[in-house]
Amino acid sequence: MELFKTKKELKEYLKEKKDAGMTIGFVPTMGALHDGHLSLFREAKDENDLVVASIFVNPTQFNSKSDLEKYPRTPEADLKKLEGEGCDVVFHPSNEEMYPEPDTTEFDFGGLDEVMEGKYRPGHFKGVASVVKKLFEIVEPHRAYFGLKDYQQLLIIHKMVKDFNIPVELVPCPIVREKNGLAMSSRNELLSKSERKQASLIYKTLKFVKVQAGFQPIHELKNHVEREFKRKNMKLEYFEIVDLFTLEPLTTWLGSKNVIACIAVYVGNVRLIDNIILFS
Ligand code: PAF
């Protein structure tokens, strides 16, 4: 496995491979790798000649300094896992390498950034889009792999790729869950044993919502979810039932064909997100 810290060296290496006709699959990450990430590598490995992973905790997508500071960082363990998965290339740049000067690119996400994560984490998606755009320009992958847990992020990256005509195929990958249903996330590392147990309520609730979808009125279902988290002393930041493509909140099931339910909950001090597709 090759490890690069500079854009220049990585670009030179990849140019040779592309000139030789190899296809490049890319998995951008912020490290603290878990089985969810590893499933992205496996898919990338199946579909491409060469797999590139990046490990970069992107400061511009954190809207709180303490969240950035406490984000788990396990670079040695990450490199071992990647090697074990047969990853070919790792890009692990410094902040200065990625942001020699502040990024001034303007993005228009067409309102996709105004709800849910965008509403509660102002500036988050601008940070995500700017780092992913930079990474795409450096790696120039044929395909890039993203987990569906961050569904809103995936839609926003899709819009950015379209707007900037970036020639990459985005490959959405299924959410990988722990035994108790908790969606795998680097942030799960920050949960205590009992919080991990508590957090199973998130997926349990989403599954209940899926069973009720189309039958119980949306406002009643939302009230029910709010009550459930309150009862268990967990802070529900949002629970929304939205259109799968526009992310506009729905108030009725009538005429709704593509629908997803998205949730953000604090378990202790750890903020977790999850979602479930209700109709598509
Ligand atoms: O999903 C993530 O881990 C990050 O948002 C990403 C896409 C690697 C950008 O920093």
Image (cartoon, grey):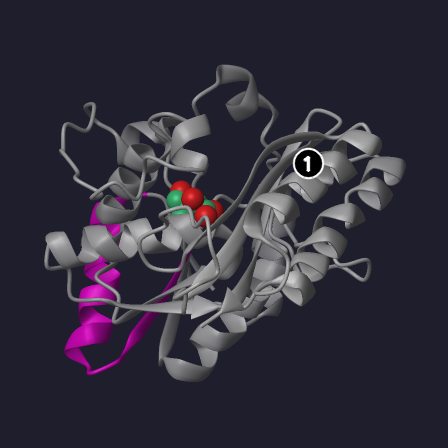
Residue 240 horizontal/vertical position (percent): 51, 44
Q: What residue type is labelled 1?
A: Glu
Q: Is residue 146 left or right of residue 135?
A: right
Residue 162 horizontal/vertical position (percent): 16, 58
**Residue reaching furthest right?**
194
**Is residue 55 in view from this perspective?**
no
In this rendered view, identify the residue nearer to me: 84 or 150.
Answer: 150
Q: In this view, does 169 lie to the left or right of 95?
A: left
Question: What residue range appears in magenta?
Answer: 6-28
In this rendered view, identify the residue nearer to me: 156 or 59.
Answer: 156
Examine the rendered structure and indicate whether residue 196 appears above or below residue 83.
above
Residue 2 horizontal/vertical position (percent): 42, 60
Residue 80 horizontal/vertical position (percent): 62, 57
Q: Does the residue labelled 1 lie within 8 Å of ligand 1?
A: no
In this rendered view, identify the residue nearer to me: 19 or 95.
Answer: 95
Q: Which residue is label 1 attached to?
A: 226
In this rendered view, identify the residue nearer to me: 268 or 85.
Answer: 268
Which quarter shows the C terminus?
A: bottom left
Q: Does the magenta stretch include residue 24?
A: yes
Residue 115: name its quadrant: top left
Examine the rendered structure and indicate whether residue 270 appears above or below residue 63.
below
Residue name at image x 41 percent, y 64 percent: 256
Residue 139: name its quadrant: bottom left
**Is residue 132 in view from this perspective?**
yes
For label 1, the crowd category at 10 Å Cα-Cα, with few meaning under 14, some 14 to 19 and many 20 or more, is: some
Residue name at image x 62 percent, y 68 percent: 84
Q: Is residue 262 magenta?
A: no
Secondary structure of residue under mark 1: helix
**Residue reaching furthest top?**
65
Residue name at image x 35 percent, y 47 percent: 248
